[in-house]
Image: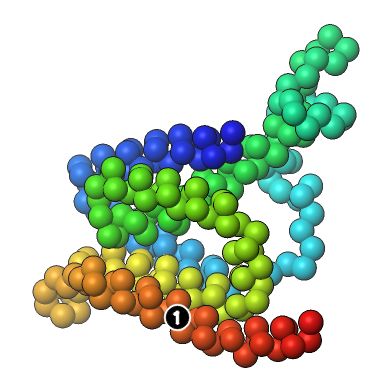
Amino acid sequence: MGIIGALIFRAIMIFIGAGLISQFHWILYLFGILLLYTAVKMFTHQEEEDFNPESSSVIKFTKKILPLSQVYHPEKFVVLEHGKYLFTSTFVTLLVVEFSDILFALDSIPAIFSITTDAFIVYTSNIFAILGLRSLFFMLSGVMELFIFLKKGVSILLAFVGIKLLLPLISPYIFGREIHIPILISLGVILGTLTISILASVPHYLKIKKEN
């Protein structure tokens, strides 16, 4: 259910975004600013040791507007209790998952639009990414803990893509002409940054492995 919702929401966002870009090219510059903001926030963010689900704004908002059952129903979204239809904690979990996916899409979709504005290519690449990442989630979550600089590398990549989107706008004022970063250079920067991030994390990885 979560994957189906992700595919539907991403289809809506991608095709609306592609349509807007075809009519208003300057939207790409807004995407660039969004990616730069996300990059700075990710680079400076400190991980919290303990996460309390009750502190989630989605859960708080849901509790205010929806009647919720206090009984756990793992296979139902809505139940009938005392003559009233109530939503279950399983439904709330689904909402949190979908909301998290939408937030993630706000970063990933603009990044892909920096490579191509073809809605079909953007959407199909998102489908493969969703199916691949969700099946490898537990392995990747473990890797992120071991390769401590990988998240910093991703934030640098987001900043690079943001600059790539903004460069045609600001380059005439700096260099006197529009500058566009070729796709091959972009792919090289992506591969190089990820490689350096992983290699820089190897000493930490070996230390953890030795301790265990």
Q: Residue at x 73, y 21 (%)?
A: 78
- Circle 1 residue: 195
Residue 141 image point, x, y percent: 64, 64
Left or right: 125, with 41 as reference point = left
Relative depth, front residue between 5 and 100: 5
Image vertical order of residue 66 relative to residue 171, above or below: above
Horizontal relation, residue 211 to residue 173: left or right: right
Q: Nearer the viewer, residue 146 or 6?
A: 146
- Mark 1 residue crowding within 10 angstroms, few (<14) / some (14–19) / many (20+): some
Which quadrant of the view contains residue 98? top right
| Residue 167 appears in the picture as rendered | no
Q: Position of residue 193 (x, y in %)?
A: 42, 79
Query: What secondary structure is found at the residue carrying circle 1?
Result: helix
Residue found 72% across the figure and 84% down from its top: 208
Count of numbered marks: 1
> Quick check: 142 above or below 3?
below
Q: Is residue 149 visible?
A: yes
Using residue 162 as the reference point, say whether residue 176 is left or right of it.
left
Determine whether 26 is above or below 194 in the image. Answer: above
Residue 134 rendering spot, x and y as whole percentages: 56, 51
For badge 1, the amino acid type reads: Thr
How are the colours assigned in the image?
A: rainbow
Q: Which quadrant does the C terminus fall into?
A: bottom right
